[in-house]
Amino acid sequence: MTYQKVTVVGGGTLGSQIAFMAAFSGKDTTIWGRSEGSLERAKARVDRWENEVKAYYDAADADIESARDHLNYTTSLEDALAGADLVIEALPENVETKTDFYEKFDKLADPETVVVTNSSTMMPSQFAETTGRPEKFLGYHFANEIWKNNTAEIMSGPETDATLPETLEEFSREIKMVPIMVKKEQPGYVLNSLLVPFLDAGTDLWVRDVADPETVDKTWMIGTGAPVGPFGIMDLVGLNTVYEINKGRPDEKSQHAAEKIKERMDQGLIGQETGQGFYTYPNPAYLEDDFLS
């Protein structure tokens, strides 16, 4: 067994999923949140994941109860980092937010603690020196709904110790993931190098008023046999994440897309988590029998 005491920094959609799967796999897991409010939202997310994981694995009630017993919550970063074997940063896709955390991590974490970033698009080398331990730092990216879309992408930075990826590979298997070994730094790893351009293409058709979201998704689903289109995927990922990715890019097209997405977010249309994004949940139109007709 590799890392036993795991801390997940950030209890958003992916952070809470990672934490629950770690706890479900017997790891002593802590979720750190900035405020009691953020922790309450994390707990509500975990309640959802409990049901999803129980159904997916046909798990017993005792398995879910054991996961709860292995999961803790705190707003104290000092307490969250104390004694941690592995810290998984799962903060929003914002350079300033992540940099602020790593500066604090450098001062508070035990010398032997390994730290990884779940960033969707940023490279480990952007933050390696700020961690204070670039040799113990790499990129570690998960897909949404990780209990079934169970890839764990492992991507070293230039200064990462050569033996570290092997320990993350073993840890990934321990928490029921399939490790994906990325050979060199690449913004977006493998998964998002494929996915983000796809979502960008769908967004561009909508922003330029070529086609509405339902038409884009319907076309993709009929034409490829895919179970969902780009806008359904964006609802799953969360429009806040899609917004941050676009906002962080300097080109005019991305900035225009970010503005359009922000307009929806300001109306509370965030995606599946809030019950409404481009579709309304739990019964989105793309799952209706006549959607593809």
Image: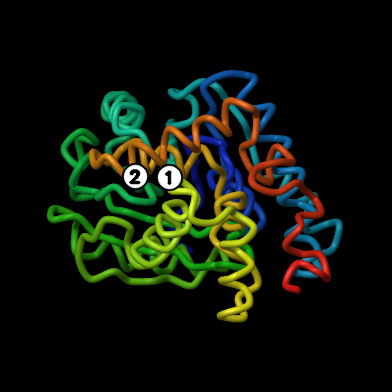
Task: Identify the element where label 2 is drawn.
Answer: strand
The residue at the point 32 percent across, 68 percent down is 166
Give the residue pinned by disc 2.
115
Q: Which residue is mark 1?
A: 88
Mark 2 → mark 1, Cα distance in angstroms: 6 Å
Give coordinates of residue 86: x percent, y percent.
41, 47
Q: Point out the tag, 2 or 1, that comes first from the N-terminus.
A: 1
Picture quadrant of residue 224: bottom right
Question: Please, what secondary structure does the residue beneath circle 1 have?
Answer: strand
Residue type indicated by callout 2: Val
Q: Is residue 225 left or right of residue 261?
A: right
**Residue at 49 percent of width and 30 percent of height:** 80
Residue 183 circle label:
none
In percent of width and height, residue 175 lies at: 56, 63
Residue at 37% over, 42% down: 246
Rendering coords of residue 73 (x, y %): 62, 31
Would residue 239 be found to the left or right of residue 88 on screen? right
Three-letter code, disc 1: Ile
Q: Quadrant of the C terminus?
A: bottom right
Task: Return the residue found at the far right.
Answer: 61
Which colouring convention does the figure follow?
rainbow
Residue at position x 48%, y 55% from top?
210
| Rendered view: 186 above or below 89 | below
169 in relation to 89, above or below: below
Q: Please state which of residues 166 and 128 is positioned toward the viewer in this rendering.
A: 128
Task: Count the numbered circles shown.
Answer: 2
Q: Are marks 2 and 1 in contact (CB under 8 Å)?
A: yes
